[in-house]
Amino acid sequence: MRHAGSPLPTLLAAALLAAAAAAAPAGAQEDAPAPAVTVLHCERMFDAVDGRNRGRTTIVVAEGRIRSVSDGYADVPGATVVDLSGHTCSPGWIDLHVHLDGESGPQSYTEGFRLEPEFIALRSTVYARRTLLAGFTSVRDLGGQTTLALRDAIDQGFVEGPRITAAGKSIATTGGHADPTNGMNHLIADALGEPGPVEGVIDSPDEARAAVRQRYKEGSDVIKITATGGVLSWAASGDAPQFTVDEVVAIVQTARDYGYRVAAHAHGKEGIRRAIVGGVDSIEHGTYMDAEIFALMRKHGTWYVPTISAGRFVADKAKIDGYFPEIVRPKAARIGALIQETFGRAWQAGVKIGFGTDSGVGRHGDNAAEFEYMVEAGMPAAMALQTATINAAEVLGVDDRGRIAPGLLADIIAMPGDPLTDIHVVRRVDFVMKDGRIVAAP
């Protein structure tokens, strides 16, 4: 953070710039090299707005942005040409629900006691790169304090990974899904002290407002609350409501003051209802939603981020002795198996759907499997791809990505084959461009 003070540094910088300009030879501006131009020749291009493929397409990229999009294979003198014949080009995908600071497993419940934050942060760089190479050029990370630093390191070019919209610490109630003292014995819990708004634990509207302001202080981009119990938390209930409506309203109103959107982890129906009425922007997981909740979501314009991948992962791992603690295992077996079926009913009911995997519960880099699960549940492939492009961009509240169009960020991926006729090719992304820079090429 820069602080107000002496004007001398600013004046010195201005003087140096003026001297440099005076010393530059006449006409130097005119002789500056033209920006590098990259041309992509795509066999097909997925039009995220219309939900269909265009035929052969030329995409011209310069200075990190899409300069033009035209039919056929056009020649651009002096440009670098990337031949993507046989490939389908697509806007870079957006995963709205990841946790880049770890991956769940039998060791997860002790990592907080064993691993240094520096180690967790360094490990997350591997997960970030894996996610980017899978075709996800943007993600929304919904819980993980080290992710704030990871976001900044990626933005500044020190680490390779997707663009991150980060929540930082999730907001919970005492004993709720994101209470950091859950599962600790009383000696450790007493030594740490009772968590409060600074640690993201609240029990009143006033504390709710303080917790949002603390997230602002820490540099979060979005607010995440745990409106119900969770599958993997050390607690018996995975679906009980854990916020009052007044608490949710206080969070949402304060979040709006800072330009934040609010995502709500929620499994049980009553907790989901309170979150929607309280004004959250998206429901994550939504396991026990029904027709009444679908109607309420349509009325309020609330988005649904299903995370089918996480549900299937935990249901599968619950069959393995010792993988989860015994207090977690029955929740994982029961709740995890339901999410895909809920998703199928939700999209048929006209609920707005954004793409999210909860990667970090499952393996980072397997994010594209979510498309397969969506199609398996009955959603057309084109609609599934739209959830991770134009829909996801709308959930984030951004208009610079999610489509391939002039002026937008040059976040473009490609895969061999046609995902509209064979959804499984989404797992074979072999070309990734972010900000106009090629990260991977066939």
Image (cartoon, grey):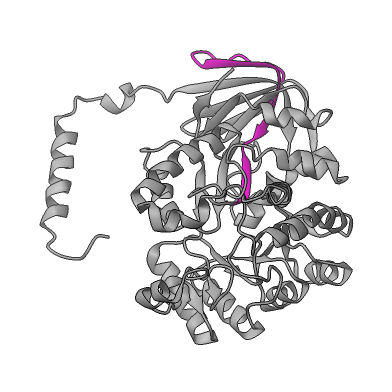
Q: Position of residue 345 (x, y in %)?
A: 87, 57
Q: Position of residue 131 (x, y in %)?
A: 56, 38
The front one of 257 and 378 is: 378
The front one of 263 and 98 is: 98
Is residue 58 toward the left or the right of residue 178 in the image?
Answer: right
Residue 82 within the segment the image draws in magenta: yes
Residue 393 visible to the viewer = yes
Magenta residue span: 70-97
Q: Quadrant of residue 388?
A: top right
Q: Main secondary structure of the magenta part?
A: strand
Q: Quadrant of the C terminus?
A: top right
Q: Quadrant of the N terminus?
A: bottom left
Q: Position of residue 69 (x, y in %)?
A: 65, 29
Residue 385 visible to the viewer = no
Q: Quadrant of residue 19?
A: top left
Q: Position of residue 401 (x, y in %)?
A: 60, 44
Residue 30 within the segment the image draws in magenta: no
Q: Quadrant of residue 415?
A: top right
Outermost front residue: 321
The front one of 57 and 139 is: 139
Q: Residue at x 71, y 78 (%)?
A: 274
Q: Residue at x 54, y 30 (%)?
A: 433
Looking at the image, residue 87 lies above or below residue 178: above
Looking at the image, residue 47 lies above or below residue 3: above
Numbered disc total? 0
Q: Residue at x 47, y 69 (%)?
A: 184
